[in-house]
């Protein structure tokens, strides 16, 4: 589920639509939590789909560590990539605002964490645009992503969290344990899918 203070807006014919903040969302706010309404498409089910269904799933899903494609039932599936993203997935499975997001600002994410099956050309236009987002960006950018998540998690308990109750109790416990002790941090690479191990 996407943060409640968001809406869908058309951007242009090339990008399509995006998710925008309808109110201030401070750094450290959980912006997405997987809930029980998400559509889970197993690798086996995906293989049996016709090409039209596959195209929709490919466009609107991310691949979790088990290889399952997750299609959000709400606006979350419309969050676009930017190399200077303002939200990121954590090793705990939720996404978090890595800086303050102003009203009317687009929520953007780091697609390099989503277990891409192939590279894509990025045209986000940010000063730090990588040009190409690759499946192996984990090795290059993982340490920076983790440093950003560690810093951002320190703000988690300082701001309102409307999505906190949607997190699995184990996720809440693990997050609280890390915040209280600084131990057992879950790196973003926990989200990585290794198909050869399945």
Image (spheres, rainbow, N blue to C red):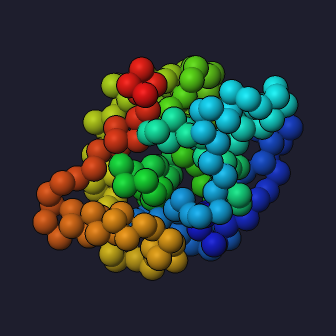
Residue 20 lies in quadrant: bottom right
Q: Position of residue 55 (x, y in %)?
A: 77, 31
Left or right of residue 76: residue 159: left
Vertically, is 44 above or below 119?
below
**Marker count (numbered):** 0
In this rendering, the answer to whether 183 lies above or below 45 is below
The one of 79 and 59 positioned closer to us in this rendering: 59
Residue 73 percent location from the top left of the image: 71, 58
Q: 137 or 25: which is nearer to us?
A: 137
Residue 93 in view in this figure: yes
Where 170 sits versus 78, above or below? below
Quarter of image, res 62: top right
- The reply to whether residue 102 is visible in this rendering is no
Give coordinates of residue 74: x percent, y percent.
Answer: 71, 60
Quadrant where the N terminus is found in the figure:
bottom right
* Viewer-side residue, 170 vs 81: 170
Q: Residue at x 59, y 64 (%)?
A: 36
**Quadrant occupied by the C terminus:** top left
């Amino acid at each position: 589920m996407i943060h409640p203070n968001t809406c869908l807006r058309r951007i242009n014919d090339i990008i399509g639509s995006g998710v925008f903040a309808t109110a201030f969302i401070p750094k450290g706010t959980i912006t997405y939590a997987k809930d029980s309404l998400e559509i889970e498409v197993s690798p086996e089910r995906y293989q049996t789909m016709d090409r039209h269904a596959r195209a929709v799933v490919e466009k609107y899903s991310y691949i979790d560590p088990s290889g399952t494609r997750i299609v959000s039932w709400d606006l979350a599936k419309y969050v676009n990539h930017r190399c200077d993203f303002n939200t990121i997935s954590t090793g705990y499975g939720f996404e978090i605002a890595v800086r303050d997001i102003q009203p009317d600002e687009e929520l953007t994410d780091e697609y390099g964490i989503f277990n891409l099956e192939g590279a894509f050309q990025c045209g986000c236009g940010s000063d730090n645009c990588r040009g190409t987002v690759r499946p192996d960006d984990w090795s290059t950018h993982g340490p920076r992503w983790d440093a950003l998540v560690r810093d951002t998690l320190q703000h988690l308990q300082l701001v309102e969290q409307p999505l906190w109750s949607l997190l699995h109790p184990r996720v809440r416990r693990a997050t609280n344990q890390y915040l209280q002790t600084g131990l057992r941090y879950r790196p973003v690479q926990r989200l990585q899918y290794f198909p050869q191990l399945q």
